[in-house]
Image (cartoon, grey):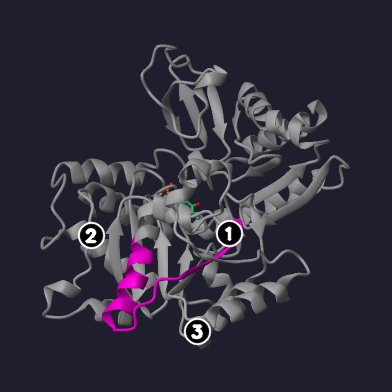
Amino acid sequence: MTQNPNSPVWHPFTQHGLGDSIPLISHAKDSKLYDAEGNGWIDAISSWWVTTHGHSHPRIMAAIRAQTEKLDQLIFAGWTHEPAESLAAELVRITPDPLTRVFFSDSGSTSVEVALKMALGYWYNIGEPRSHILVLEHSYHGDTIGTMSVGERGVYNRAWQPLLFDVGTIPFPHDGQEQATLDALEAACRQKPAAFIVEPLILGAGGMLIYPAWLLAEMRSICARHGVLFIADEVMTGWGRTGTRFACDQAGVIPDIVCLSKGLTGGAIPLAVTLCIEPIFQAHFSDDRGRAFYHSSSYTANPIACAAAVANLEIWRDEPVQQRIDALADAQAAHLAMLSHDPRVTNPRRLGTIAALDIAVPDAGYLSTLTPRLTAFYRDKGVLLRPLGNSVYVMPPYCITPAELAQVWDSIAASIERV
Ligand SMILES: *Cc1c(COP(=O)(O)O)cnc(C)c1O
């Protein structure tokens, strides 16, 4: 089944002028998406990096159903509810001790906006106003004006560049160029910026670019030495993607601010949190209303979404999630190894459950048509993959079966033959 051509829906990151048909999905279970006629697709990118345990996980669905019987929505300014309280307490428990406060929002982008606002609010309230933000080259932090400002500039945000604020860009630590990154960060930190924001260990939308844990730790200690707030955007990397629950865990890094969203509810329903260290909260804590943290959205800490997140944390506690992640990581490594010696494949790379490779392309003109052709090719083979340029990556839910994963990689192998 496909979308009615007269549909009024305007899709994100979709060029409607190309006339591609859009599948109409009616239900999903585990790693599979289905239309009403029973056609199935393997969701090899976890519905854009959100679905961790699998679609329609029974415990998350049950938690949502149960919460709908109790409390649907509640103003969160000056009021509270049990699912938010349990979730916040549990998040503080499973993250490093210095992270003591949890601020709720609804998407990865808003969790990053909140992080930036917290950082500037901190400096403002302690009487040492700072507003300059440092970012890593090729980063992606969301699509709002603020998060585009701290992300890579390019074709995706050309029209809005006049509105984007200036940031300090630290060069990406390509293999062998790590010292240049550290030196640039050190120099930039001397200028007293407010904060440095990073995607820990892997830059997602920037093309699945991986850098080593020791470098993340080094960057963190440079910021600590200079008193620059360190923001970890774990919106994509969180909840097991990189092999550990959070990417920062692998580097022994404790950030000042952490953004979490995508897998927070297991990918079932939108929710985000920004965790921070106590001094940031204390800078806003006062009997002066003017120092309050002025940020909210209508659905902040929606009870149904919080209940789903509580269920996600129970799954992490009660089910062998880490074993599934380890097994998936091994399987991904094995599949990637089979393709990595192909002369048409460059830059094979993997971090935890995420595997990626680049397909060698003759020129940029060819590249511009390659991505949509690949996407359509995979779709016809029953696989949802969405390459970033010529980078094909596989980021499946942890419940994907060996046979399904083999089908995904077979379709990638076939696509390389085809191009
Ligand atoms: C997806 C993503 C975001 C934005 O999250 P949304 O929920 O799409 O707003 C922010 N940062 C990173 C690293 C992401 O991958």
| Picture residue at 64% right of the left edge, 52% below the top | 208
Residue 214 appearing in the image:
no
Q: Amino acid at mark 2?
A: Ala
| Picture residue at 59% right of the left edge, 40% below the top | 401
- Is 136 contained in the magenta span? yes
Residue 345 appearing in the image:
yes
Q: Which residues are magenta?
A: 114-138
- Determine the residue located farthest toward the bottom in the rendered image: 225
The kind of secondary structure element at disc 1 is loop
Residue to which mark 1 is pinned: 242
Q: CA distance from mark 2 to mark 3?
A: 31 Å
Q: Position of residue 365 (x, y in %)?
A: 75, 32
Q: Earlier in the sequence, mark 2 or mark 3?
A: 2
Tags 2 and 3 touching, CB below 8 Å: no
Q: Earlier in the sequence, mark 1 or mark 2?
A: 2
| Picture residue at 30% right of the left edge, 77% below the top | 124
Counting other residues with Cα less than 10 Å from the Cα at mark 1, is it few (<14), some (14-19), or many (20 or more)?
A: many
Q: CA distance from mark 3 to mark 1?
A: 24 Å
Q: Position of residue 101 (x, y in %)?
A: 29, 72
Q: Is mark 2 within 8 Å of ligand 1?
A: no
Counting other residues with Cα less than 10 Å from the Cα at mark 3, is it few (<14), some (14-19), or many (20 or more)?
A: some
Q: Amino acid at mark 3?
A: Ala
The kind of secondary structure element at disc 2 is helix
Q: CA distance from mark 1 to mark 2?
A: 26 Å
Q: Amino acid at mark 1?
A: Thr
